[in-house]
Image (spheres, grey):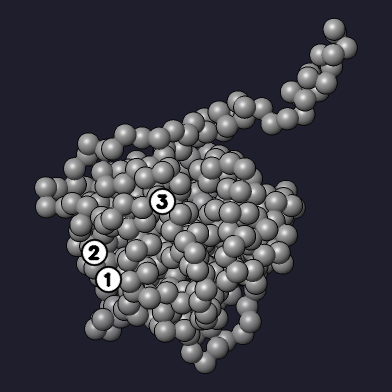
């Protein structure tokens, strides 16, 4: 009898512990939020630009979500001895070419809600406007897509994905979708191409996920697996950096199938727990509980921690879970280009999309994560600088908004350096 127990004991020792999830994070469904952003904001208009300052922090009022709480003690930021004075830092206002201070541009031009500057992991500036709480996670929408590409790259490094294999290999439910047979995992991770969708199909996809009210369906994956869904052409033009789309939901599905875990758990194990965050994150789901490609929400401090994580990955090399080739691809310059793609007008020449991030032209080794409405993350690897911004710019993207962001980055960057290195 005692020998019969040996295989069972070995199985328990070698198999993943059911308590492993609790070691890093507590993940659970949340009830519909009782927090109301205002009686005039409802399911029909919560994603309208004029409402986002309030609704992006109260997304649980309109859609189901899972909360992700780290069980690892947070690592609080230490403040630098000398703080930046944004009102004394002058920049050129792209709208009228007048000289104005950075604080003015943030508040008046970008409609900033929160702004953080880190150098070497120390706080040089942290400000909030319009009654925004520092602890409240904000829905990142399109800014989630680069994080999914990073998770895909980490899955490749861990042997979960073979990048040249078809996505169908990792999502057996899609075997009958012949239009996906030539779509590789690498192409999904690159995020530099997209399927061609009609406006009606995008509207149906949003309703399937619960982003918009409409006829109930069986969830996002049922919509993705509708017969003939992927019988369409692809374009090599990069999708908008500010938007999500059905292609991103394919990557979330492939990740969950490959790890055999919900996306929230994959995010916790590979990213969130490593940040040692101060505040819970949440991830929006469809009515069936499947995490959505644009559904991640982080507090501004933890958003800045994500930038710091990327910065430190370049220094730590093989000691980081982030593969070195991912960071080098983000930062390596291909030389200046004559023009940027239309969605990057306003940034320095030579700026281009990579894995959903933006490799910035001009000064080398600078990367940005651009979400809609000014929400953004800037990383200068040479200066060891991270700038995180939550904003409510009244348009998802414009050359004026991008030019204003770059003016702020260009003025804040040198001001964070010792006098002899500016």
Q: Whole-percent x and y of residue 40? A: 11, 52
Res. 416 visible in picture: no
Q: Residue at x 47, y 34 (%)?
A: 27
Q: Residue at x 84, y 16 (%)?
A: 6
Instruction: Give me the disc on residue 80.
Output: none
Q: Is residue 365 above or below residue 312?
A: below
* Disc 2 element: helix
Q: Whole-percent x and y of residue 253? A: 54, 53
First of labels 3, 2 by sequence position = 2
- Kindly identify which residue carries mark 3: 219
- Kindly identify which residue carries mark 2: 49
- Kindly identify which residue carries mark 1: 395
Q: Nearer the viewer, residue 108 or 33?
A: 33
Q: Is residue 200 left or right of residue 36?
A: right
Question: Please, which residue is most extreme toward the bottom here?
Answer: 338
Question: Please, which residue is most extreme toward the right here?
Answer: 3
């Amino acid at each position: 009898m005692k020998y019969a127990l040996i295989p069972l004991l070995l199985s328990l020792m070698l198999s993943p512990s059911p308590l492993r999830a609790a070691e890093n994070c507590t993940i659970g469904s949340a009830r519909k939020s009782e927090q109301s952003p205002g009686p005039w904001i409802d399911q029909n208009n919560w994603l309208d630009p004029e409402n986002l300052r309030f609704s992006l922090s109260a997304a649980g009022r309109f859609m189901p979500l899972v909360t992700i709480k780290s069980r690892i003690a947070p690592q609080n930021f230490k403040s630098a001895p000398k703080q930046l004075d944004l009102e004394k830092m002058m920049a050129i206002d792209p709208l009228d070419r007048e000289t104005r201070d950075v604080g003015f541009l943030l508040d008046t031009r970008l409609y900033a809600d929160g702004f953080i500057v880190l150098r070497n992991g120390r706080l040089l500036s942290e400000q909030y406007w319009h009654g925004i709480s520092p602890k409240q996670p904000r829905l990142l929408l399109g800014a989630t897509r680069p994080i999914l590409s990073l998770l895909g790259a980490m899955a490749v490094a861990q042997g979960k994905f073979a990048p040249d294999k078809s996505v169908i290999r990792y999502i057996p439910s899609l075997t009958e979708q012949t239009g996906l047979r030539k779509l590789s995992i690498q192409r999904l991770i690159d995020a530099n191409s997209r399927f061609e969708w009609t406006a009606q199909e995008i509207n149906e996809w949003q309703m399937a996920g619960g982003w918009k009210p409409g006829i109930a369906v069986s969830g996002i994956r049922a919509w993705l697996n509708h017969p003939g869904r992927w019988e369409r052409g692809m374009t090599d033009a990069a999708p908008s950096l500010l938007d999500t789309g059905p292609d991103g939901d394919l990557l979330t599905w492939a990740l969950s199938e490959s790890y055999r875990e919900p996306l929230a758990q994959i995010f916790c194990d590979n990213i969130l727990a490593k940040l040692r965050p101060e505040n819970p994150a949440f991830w929006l789901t469809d009515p069936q509980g499947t995490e959505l490609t644009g559904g991640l929400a982080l507090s501004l401090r933890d958003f800045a921690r994500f930038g710091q994580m990327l910065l430190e990955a370049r220094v730590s090399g093989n000691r980081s879970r982030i593969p070195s080739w991912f960071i080098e691809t983000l930062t390596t310059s291909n030389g200046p280009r004559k023009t940027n793609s239309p969605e990057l007008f306003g940034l320095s020449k030579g700026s281009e999309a990579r894995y959903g991030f933006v490799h910035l032209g001009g000064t080398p080794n600078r990367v940005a994560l651009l979400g809609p409405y000014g929400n953004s993350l800037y990383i200068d690897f040479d200066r060891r600088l991270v700038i995180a911004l939550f904003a409510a710019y009244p348009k998802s993207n414009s050359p004026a908004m991008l030019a204003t962001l770059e003016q702020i980055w260009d003025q804040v960057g040198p001001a964070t350096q010792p006098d002899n290195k500016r």
